[in-house]
Amino acid sequence: MLRFLIGRFFSSFLSIIGATLAIFTLTNFHNDPRLLFVPDSGNGITQEQWDRLGERLGMNKPFHQRYLQWIGRTLRGDLGMSLARSMAVTDILAAKIPATLELALGGWAFAILLGIPTGVIAAVYRGSIWDYIARFMALVGQAAPPFVTGLILIYIFNQWITPGGHPLLPAGGRSPEFDIKDYILPCVALGWGAAAALMRLTRSSMLEILDSEYIRLARAKGVSWSTVIFKHALRNALIAPVTSALLIFSGWLNGALVVEIIFSWPGIGYDALYKAVNDNDFPLLLGTVFVFILIYLIFATLADIAYTVIDPRVRLN
């Protein structure tokens, strides 16, 4: 395990360097960040002020020197200041992560509670009406992108079903006080596709396990069907779904951009990443990407470690 963790740490370090270097390079080919400080009229800034801004932003230094300085500050926990908002990048991310975390947890819970049990039922009762219903749900879930699902849900539960002239569920936004109604539509729109993917993975894994020799041997020895399903088959079949679920959750923590835009959700995907790209706010963009990479690598490592917990046959060597 120690050897595996050391190797994972080294590969994660290389991934961080490669990703941040790529983003840092791309930001230098985009619009000059000094344009953020120029009025729309194009007047009000002199050449001297332009040069002074370049010096303050480090534009007069070589590329490699600026990158190394940014890496040094980041390792000390300083992600810099947002150019467009004049705020510390860490403060912006800290303010937006809770909303994204709530949305991700809600969508993740919906995906797991719907996808994995449905996949088990479809595999155990293969060829039955339940199997066909589950496969149809998976087909619809994977065929419809989140923005289509979100818009349909808004039309049905906010425009069509209006008891007493009032929408059944809000179309977007999040109240300062916790209200479960604010979370239902965004979480379903976010988790529907993931639930379909988990259902298909669970079903295919369960079918492979149920057709194996040791399952037939257990049945021949008189082991009950429920014990075979939940103790022998399901545990071994969960490797692929668990890996997928952890990576899906890490992706949502990095910002469910489309869902956040449709439902006006104040999360990190829209308020940090999307606006940073549009404004060429490279300190905010680099800081956001750095946090995204860390989250993804942490959950990828947890997925690898979960292999040994679920199936001791897996060897990390």
Image: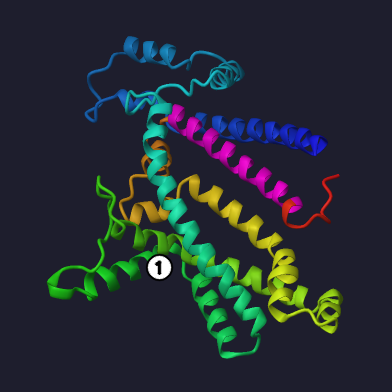
User: Eyeballing the image, is 81 above or below 158?
Assistant: above
Count residues near mark 1 (Cα–Cα under 10 Å), then give few for <14, some for 14-19, many for 20+.
Answer: many
Nearest the viewer among 38 and 242 is 242
Q: In terms of image quadrants, where is residue 243? A: bottom right
Nearest the viewer among 277 and 220 is 220
Q: Position of residue 67 (x, y in %)?
A: 58, 21
Nearest the viewer among 299 and 66 is 299
**Residue for badge 1:** 149
* Left or right relative to 255: residue 42: left
**Magenta residues (range):** 282-308
Q: Residue at x 36, y 35 (%)?
A: 95
Q: Position of residue 101 (x, y in %)?
A: 44, 46
Quadrant of the snapshot with the C terminus: top right
Q: Residue at x 58, y 17 (%)?
A: 72
The secondary structure making up most of the magenta span is: helix
Residue extending farthest to the bottom is 128
Q: Position of residue 223 (x, y in %)?
A: 78, 79
Q: Position of residue 196 (x, y in %)?
A: 54, 70
**Residue 32 in view, yes or no:** no
